[in-house]
Amino acid sequence: MTILSLGFILLAALLAGKLIRRLKVPVVTAYLLLGIIVGPSVLNLVSEDILGSSGMISNIVLGLIAFTIGQNFALERFRKIGKPVLWISIFEASGAWLLVTLIFWLILRQPFYIALLFGAISSATAPAATMMVVREYKAKGSFTDTLLGIVAIDDAWCLIIFALSFSVAKALFAHISSNIFLFKAVFHSLSEIAGAFILGGILALVLAYLSRFVTTPSDLLIYTLGFIFLNTGLALYLNFSVLLANMFMAAILVNVHKVSFKFFETLRTVDSPLYLLFFVLAGANLEIGLLKGLGLLGLVYVAFRALGKIGGAYLGGAIAQVPVRMKNYMGLALLPQAGVALGVALIAKTQFPEIGGMIFTTIVATTVIYEIIGPICTRISLSKAGEI
Amino acid sequence: MKVKDCMSKKVVSVKRSTTLSQLIKTFQKHNFHTLPVVEEDNRLVGVINFEDILKVFRPYSVELSTMLNAVPFLEMEFKEEDFLAADISSEMGILVVVDDIMNAGFASIDPEADINQARTEMKVHNTHRLAVVEGAKLVGMISLFDIILTVFKERGVIQ
């Protein structure tokens, strides 16, 4: 049944992706909706074995995602990135993070660790949806270039913000539930982050040094995947952040290894089916029953994430001294939410079984909403900026 | 046998400032898949494959395209540019230069390296042609055909 389920998921998702592309909606949304339909909440066509392995698959995929995103931290590339992209991306990501966290904590009266998780997830954007609008309307100009630069780097900030918030949330949860001293809990959280950096750094150096023994393209793929799994597995075993460990491994690798691009290129040959499986399983993990009670939560999330991004982008734009139109409309262009938000929400679900379902269901539902209204907002802001 | 013993020392190269139309003519004339990109002092700064020409159909800069390359899931949405249906203006031939589309990350080999190593590098990087670099300067190019030719000559298969 498990293998049959896998075959069905891959082929049905491929078909769903082709169909939804005609509607100008990102294929990620198709995978997600397919997952919801074939999942236990609706048709129940996915075997329990596969559903049970969602945690493992999401850890592997998030390891891959973090590693892939980490290559943007090449110092040379960072120098060329430009002030507007850097400042606006940092401020819009942290703007959504802070505002959503504060509103969930102070207004919705959610425990601080839950508010922090919602805030961190809200910092992600959806490069694919943004790109789709840019291409469809043939947008061109400095606003478009800055927008694409921001969505390219933004998910890296999201992973860092989430990794930090996740580790603090775990510490606070342990402090509340097991009466562990706050100091000890904070120390655990710091060691989780520092450990990830040390682990990722050491493995990057070993990976770079031993790569001279790799002699064929298939060896290269096995070698790269092997190191990502090793890093992910060790991070899980040692209770370090999987996201930071993999991102840092890539960041060190691109700065110490002259031809590091080969490690990232080889992953492209295998990542698509894994991402596909990940999104379908994300959809299948949705607990539709929880949706009824999440109306207000979802609404507040959608509204204040948007405000945080718009306000943050405005502040970042003011610091970088960008033109008024860019400052005013960039946040609106950044509203789509997709893959990375789902990925980190799935981590939250796995780690906090009691409240994770509520967080994950809210993020899946708001992702569907944002994938519909987000591209419209992106189009409006590109039009206001005079680039379409 | 060393790389320097079978590499081609007469190298056809292009500059960062070479225009797209000059580049296409160079590819057409010399029938190479890969060309080195050098500075005035012969310092190797990149390589360019004929497939890189397709990058001109991307609506954004090379810097941006490198960054977007690192974004997960984008590949799932956007495969190759549909260049057969793209709008192409004749000005593109002089407006686009090699610097806009070359690969600044590339594999190279030392002239003192063994040809086995050159072959391995070609396999790992999925290419048939490598730049031979001494210090940072381009001193030659070695292709799979150069290696085959040298080995066959050595074994007496060809004179």
Image (cartoon, coloured by chain):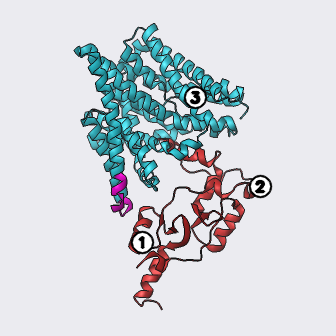
Chain holding disc 2: B
Corner quadrant of residue A9: top left
Q: Are marks 1 and 3 on the same chain?
A: no
Kind of residue indicated by mark 3:
Leu
Q: Is residue A305 left or right of residue A227?
A: right
Kind of residue indicated by mark 2:
Glu
* B125 versus A4 height, above or below: below
Write down the residue under mark 3.
A334
Write down the residue under mark 1.
B113
* A297 versus A212 height, above or below: above
Kind of residue indicated by mark 1:
Ala
Q: Are marks 2 and 3 in contact (CB under 8 Å)?
A: no
Q: Does dot 2 land on a helix, a strand or a loop?
A: loop
Q: What colour is chain A?
A: cyan
Sequence order check: which comes first, mark 2 or mark 1?
2
Q: Residue at x 52, y 56 (%)?
A: B105
Q: Which mark is residue A285?
A: none
**In-front residue for pair A164/A270:** A164
Q: Which mark is residue B91?
A: 2
Corner quadrant of residue B1: bottom left
Range covered by the magenta-colored residues? A207-218
Q: Main secondary structure of the magenta part?
A: helix
